[in-house]
Image (cartoon, helix red, strand yellow):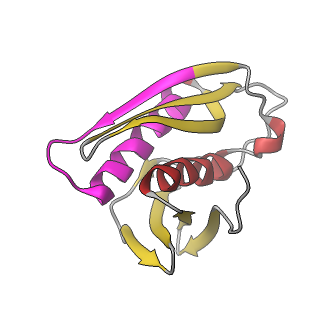
Amino acid sequence: MERNFLPFEVVDHTADVGIIAYGRNYCELLENAALGMFSLMADLMTVNPKDQREVRAEIAIPDKELLLLKWLKELHYIRDVEKFIPCKVKVTELTETKVTGLVEGEPIHEGVVLMHHIKAVTHHLVQIEHEKELLKAQVIFDV
């Protein structure tokens, strides 16, 4: 799919690190935020899409910012606990309170160039807003 915009950018924040993700719709915003987080964890050019994982995130009440955070936390769990680093992501189902997606990547090995060790996805300064014809989300990670 051709894009005329940068899907995400990295932002510095004191001792933490963050991203600003963009999307033409909420689904694309979730995918690009995930890619932004993965790119902080590893050089994605060194990760191959060898295996797949299905990821689900669900919240009790509709809240786009909370659903984004829950989604990123579930993706972070895969990296932190399963030692699996994704390099591709596709949202397959989306409602106001639930997101399901597939990630492709591989277990961490010596050929994967690791970068930041993200300890947690934070609620600090999280926001989603409209910028021209795009959605824009800011997320800060504790490193």
The reply, left or right, for residue 71 in relation to residue 8 is: left
Q: Is residue 116 visible?
A: no
The quarter holding residue 53 reads: top right
Report the number of numbered marks: 0
Residue reaching furthest left? 61
Q: Residue at x 14, y 48 (%)?
A: 61
Q: Is residue 129 above or below residue 40?
A: below
The reply, left or right, for residue 126 in relation to residue 81 is: left
Q: Is residue 119 visible?
A: yes
Q: Is residue 8 above or below residue 40?
A: below
The quarter holding residue 36 reads: bottom right
In the image, the segment drawn in magenta is: 53-81
Residue 72 picture location, percent across and down = 44, 45
Residue 130 lies within the magenta run: no
Residue 117 picture location, percent across and down = 59, 47
Q: Nearer the viewer, residue 49 or 38?
A: 49
Residue 77 lies within the magenta run: yes
Q: Residue at x 57, y 53 (%)?
A: 32
Residue reaching furthest bottom? 132
Q: Residue at x 48, y 79 (%)?
A: 131
